[in-house]
Amino acid sequence: MNILAYDFMQRALLAALLTGLAAPAVGTYLVQRRLALLGDGIGHVAVTGVALGLLTGQAPVLTAIVVATLGAILIEVIRARARTSGDVALALLFYGGIAGGVLLAELEGGTARLHEYLFGSIATASPADVWATVGLAIVVVSVAVGMSPQFFAVCQDEDFAAVQGLNVRLYSVAMSVLAAVTITIAMRTVGLLLVSALMVVPVATAQQIARGFRLTLATAMAVGTLAAVGGVTTSFYADVAPGATIVLLALAVFVATWPIGAAIRYRRRLVEPFEEPDAIAVRTEHQAAESHPHEHDEYCQHPAVVHGDHVDYVHDGHRHAPHGDHYDEH
Amino acid sequence: MTPSLEVTDGAVAIGGRPILRGIDFSARGGEVVALLGSNGSGKSTLIRACMGRLPLTRGEIRLFGVPLARFHDWRRVGYVPQRTTAASGVPATVWEVVASGRLARRRWLTPLRRDDRTAIAHAIETVGLLHRRNDEVSTLSGGQQQRVLIARALAGQPELFVLDEPTAGVDLHSQHALSDTLREIIARGATVVLVAHELGPLESLIDRTVVVRDGRIAYDGPPQPGDGMAAFHSHAHPGEGEPPDRQPLGEGGPL
Ligand SMILES: Nc1ncnc2c1ncn2[C@@H]1O[C@H](COP(=O)(O)OP(=O)(O)OP(=O)(O)O)[C@@H](O)[C@H]1O
Ligand SMILES: [Mg+2]
Ligand SMILES: [Zn+2]
Ligand SMILES: [Zn+2]
Ligand SMILES: [Zn+2]
Ligand SMILES: [Zn+2]
């Protein structure tokens, strides 16, 4: 059974690939702003949008994108106006969105069709749906990556970014709109209830192994793509909804990188250069290590850490610097 | 010559509560002005208003002679906000944070040019963090993070340098380094406005001190001996009046 022999699977894989790139790209900025759950909030609002589309006979993608964008802008406005209650506003939209969606769907005659959008479904996406997804995803990825210096600055420090001449409010709204669009793109693949996971889990994974913002962004996009494409493939063979498979795969990657991340962090801290001896402060008195039979050199197993103009060997909580025929405690 | 920064009859309210009233404040080109005052006196509020981050309820602010609302030449301004940390949700490296100080000089969708990279490296070197440039900011000590914020503003090579408590938590050695750096950029003609509780090694650079007390300017004039401790003093004895030689200056202040 060749997965690429089916037209709908080719489309589904293409959509998954682009979704896997777009969701973590936008998710990185949300995590950077400590708004990891914003994606979830917008996802829930989009449920109402989908139900509205099903009820009125419009394309659900279209209505979802409109409602989700409005919801995203609303959250941004509330956040700017009442700083303290940002998460409460988010919660209100959460509940309002999903309740509104279920109510509208029941008016339409049941929640069965809504289900496809909540948990993802690959076989039912029409070619038009997929091409819309592809187009939007390309826009999202280009903006998120191309404008990364600006977005990074705004997420990092709004005050400073503003004094660099950036329109902070505009960028914030743009980020929320990007999130809304990403969620609508992803809903056919991952589903609205799980889309936030594809935005956040790859970022958490990338943080384990990557150092710095740009590397985290790139790694998160790689992990997201892997999870999305792998999840869709698995769901095809196992005949289950793709959303859960994708998210579980992403979580599995996270769990797998955990020990690697822990090892990297430990190793990095160990060999991080010690602060240079302070030029002004009085140097601590010369203190020779007590009996020291072992001889440190570049081949011994002890971490050699740069300390100003020399090297300290680290073991048993000591920092030993070679000095003539003995070692100094540093 | 137009002042680099000028506030005329400025007032700021936060959430309807008047914080600053009747502020007349200016810094001429090449001048080094220290803003002093106790905790909560309104120094940061004044700085934030000057940087366009808080609206005035009255009065006017001009940057290089241009009213704030119409000012767009932000590459001329370097700002070190008052922060306890430079860390964020996704850990960024020292280099990445400092590089964001070049944004006002960069155009959209263009990679960093060579002079951008030189300026970034130079700024990091100036604050003595070259050996940590690829480390995540969150792994640095508080004082080192403060130095990252200073480097970020330096990277933009500003003409007006506004620093809100740049020396908080910074050790004496680095304060001397900062003082040398400021001397260098002052020599190039830059204007410096800095907030500090203890001036320390910066004291010798100061041309003029402005003391903010309870949202008003309480003193504007040449630095007085022991000004570094002025903030402490007014904090420790809030009941005492101003010494006679430190009367508030009216409109005829030194402009
Ligand atoms: N976001 C805010 N919301 C409400 N009140 C504020 C806010 N920011 C500042 N204030 C009030 O404005 C006054 C001045 O604060 P400001 O931060 O300007 O003081 P400061 O002189 O910089 O003090 P410090 O030396 O502690 O930095 C304080 O009374 C403070 O309570
Ligand atoms: Mg302050
Ligand atoms: Zn050894
Ligand atoms: Zn030893
Ligand atoms: Zn010795
Ligand atoms: Zn040593």
Image (cartoon, coloured by chain):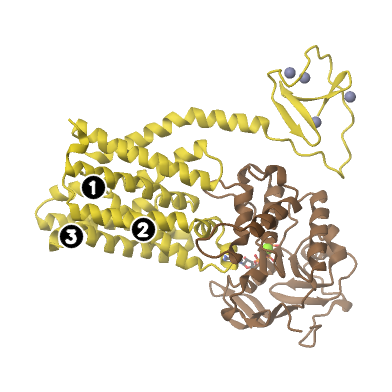
Q: Amino acid at mark 3?
A: Ala
Element marked by disc 2: helix
Q: Nearer the viewer, mark 2 or mark 1?
A: 2
Give the class, few, some or many, for how many residues have Cα within 10 Å of label 1's Cα (few <14, many ≥20).
many
Judging by colour alone, the chain drawn in brown in this rendered image is B
State the CA–CA distance, disc 2 to disc 1: 24 Å
Quarter containing the N terminus of chain A: top left
Asked whether residue A251 appears in the rendered view, the answer is yes
> Which color was chain A given?
yellow
Task: Confirm or deny contact between disc 2 and disc 3 (CB under 8 A).
Answer: no
Q: Mark 1 or mark 3, which is nearer to you?
A: 3
Q: Which residue is mark 1?
A: A118
- Asked whether mark 1 lies closer than 8 Å to ligand 1, one says no
Residue at label 2? A139
Instruction: Name the quadrant containing residue A247.
Output: top left
User: Can you tell which mark lies on residue A59?
Assistant: 3
Residue at left 87%, top 22%?
A288
Q: Nearer the viewer, residue B29 or A97?
A: B29
* Residue A309, x across and y down, in percent: 81, 35
Res A293 quadrant in image? top right
Same-subunit check for callouts 2 and 1: yes
Amino acid type assigned to the residue bearing label 1 in the image: Leu
Q: Position of residue A11 (x, y in %)?
A: 23, 46
Real-space Cα separation, disc 1 to disc 3, in angstroms: 16 Å
Chain assignment, label 2: A
From where the camera sits, is residue A184 visible? no
**At 75% across and 48% down in the image, what residue appears?**
B128
Q: CA distance from mark 2 to mark 3?
A: 20 Å
Q: Are marks 1 and 3 on the same chain?
A: yes
Name of the residue lying farthest toward the top:
A293
